[in-house]
Image (spheres, rainbow, N blue to C red):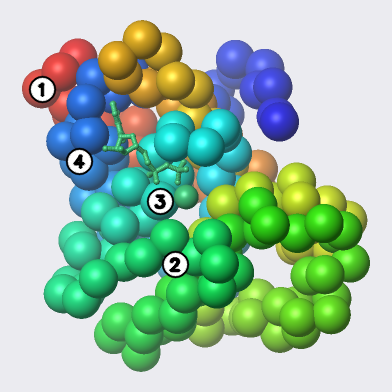
Amino acid sequence: MHSPDHNQSTLTLHLSDEAATARLGCQLAPLLAPGMVVWLDGDLGAGKTTLVRALLRALGHGGPVRSPTYTLVEIYVISRIYWYHFDFYRFNFPEEFLDAGFGEYFRDDAVCMVEWPEKAAGWVPAADLVVIFHIVGEGRTLDVVAASEEGQKCLNALKSGWRDAGD
Ligand code: ADP
Ligand code: MG
């Protein structure tokens, strides 16, 4: 688990219900560019898959968005961009990332969103953006952390655009 230092590279958001998580997905969706890697950190049930679902829906995906818990990866092609949604929770060893050939998914024409990146530690490519989910009472607190120049641009845009009725 990452512990961000609270400088200008972190945006902390309080999301009081699932609808607020969905609004974040809508705002984040247009800011992600091909080649970017997003790590989603946080306990089971914290809202990682919920965020990805909202994000893909915002991009126009009309079908189901299933948790990749068993399949390890779910693949979406939207506007000629590949969106890969990984979940490495079930890995017993980080090397399973290599055995599955997942390195080939991290390309310039793909956005990779990764749940449980720590289960593939040492092999999963570094993140541009890390979203850390905390369960706080009935809601969630998220730290959105920029981990590259690309990620910082994205975070800056998110900061200036973030509006949430719950805040
Ligand atoms: P994860 O992928 O992190 O294991 P899921 O997205 O599958 O978690 O499940 C998250 C659960 O929490 C869902 O039941 C969803 O309705 C709920 N949830 C999502 N965001 C929030 C929020 N901001 N506040 C309260 N509940 C939320
Ligand atoms: Mg999940």
Image position, residue 80 (x, y; %): 35, 89
Is the CB–ligand 1 distance for label 3 below 8 Å? yes
Task: Give the spatial CA distance, label 1 vs label 3.
Answer: 22 Å
Label 4 beta carbon less than 8 Å to ligand 1: no
Task: Identify residue for label 2.
Answer: 33
Locate ligand 1 by image quadrant. top left
The quadrant where residue 76 appears: bottom left
Going from N to C along the chain, the mark reached first, 4 or 2, is 4
Q: Quadrant of the C terminus?
A: top left
Label whose residue precedes the other's in the sequence (2 or 3)? 2
Residue at the spot 21% in from the left edge and 26% down from the top edge: 17
Horizontal side of 89 relative to 33 (left or right) equals right
CA separation in Å, label 4 and label 2: 19 Å
Amino acid type of the residue tagged 2 in the rendering: Ala
Q: Residue at x 55, y 67 (%)?
A: 70
Above or below: residue 59 compared with residue 23: below
Decide which of tag 2 and tag 1 comes sooner along the chain: 2
Residue annotated with mark 4: 23
Q: Secondary structure at mark 2?
A: loop
- Give left or right: position of 15 versus 89: left
Residue at which label 3 appears:
49
Q: Is residue 44 above or below residue 68?
A: above
Other-residue count near label 1 (Cα within 10 Å), few / some / many at <14 / 14–19 / ≥20? few
The amino acid pointed to by label 3 is Thr
Residue picked out by circle 1: 165
User: In the structure shown, which secondary structural element does the residue marked by tag 4 occupy?
Assistant: helix
Alpha carbon of mark 1 to alpha carbon of mark 4: how far?
A: 10 Å
Q: Are marks 1 and 4 in contact (CB under 8 Å)?
A: no
